[in-house]
Image (cartoon, rainbow, N blue to C red):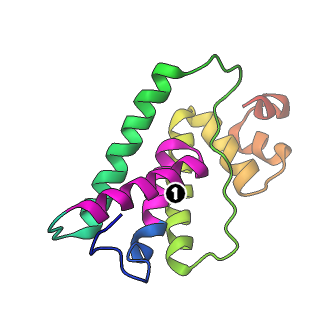
Amino acid sequence: MSSSRLPERDPLAPYRARLTGLAYRMLGSRGDADDVVQDAWLRFAAADDVRNPEAFLVTVVTRLCLDRLKSARAQREVYVGAWLPEPVFDETLSAEAATELADDLSFALMLALDALTPLERAAFLLHDVFDRPFAEVARTLERSEAACRQL
C-alpha cells in the first residue's frame, strides 16, 4: 500500500483507546473491536484531506460497527442464554481510562436501578451497595426479611 499517510509512528495512538472502547461497547467483543479500529485506520490512511482526524475516525468506527451488527443479525445463529460482552482486562489503566470506566459503571448502575421498582431499588442499595444485613433492610422497608431477600 503506497500512501504518504503511513508514517513510522502510530498516528492512531492518541485515539486508539477511545476508538477501541467505542467499538467494544457496540460489538461486545474485543477481537471485533480491534478489527473495526484497524479497518477504520485503513480508511483514514486512504482518505484525502481529513480536517479532524478524531471526528473522522469516530464516525468511521461507528458506521463499521453498525454494519457489523446488521451483518451479524442477518447471520446470527440460535444462541441459548443471555448475551454478555466479553470481559476485558487491562492491567495498565490510565487516569483517563479509569474515569471512562467509572462513567460506564455509573451509567450501567443507573440503567439497572431504573429497571427496578422503588422497593427493589431500596433493598438492592441498602443490602448490596451499603452492605446492610437483610434484618436491617426489612426493618427499614417495613417488610419481612424473606420479602426483602426476594426483592
Q: Is residue 71 left or right of residue 124?
A: left
Residue shown at 53%/56% (left/top)?
34
Foreground of the two, 15 or 106: 15
Expressed as whole percent of the image width and height from the top left, the position of residue 48 reads 17, 65
Q: Amino acid at mark 1?
A: Asp
Image quadrant assignment for residue 10: bottom left
138 relative to 96 in the view: left or right: right
Q: Nearer the viewer, residue 42 or 17?
A: 42
* Residue sitting at x 44%, y 57%: 37
Q: Name the residue beneath numbered marker 1.
A: 104
Please tell me whether residue 72 is drawn above or below residue 26 in the rendered image.
above
Quarter of the image that includes the N terminus: bottom left
Q: How many marks?
A: 1
- For the point 72% across and 31% down, the residue is 151
Judging from the image, what secondary structure is the residue with disc 1 in? Answer: helix
Q: Quadrant of residue 80?
A: top right
Above or below residue 89? Residue 80 is above
Residue 149, x across and y down, in percent: 80, 34
Dominant SS in magenta: helix
| Observer-nearest of 86 and 112 | 86
* Magenta highlight range: 18-47
In the orientation shown, which residue stands out farthest toward the top?
78
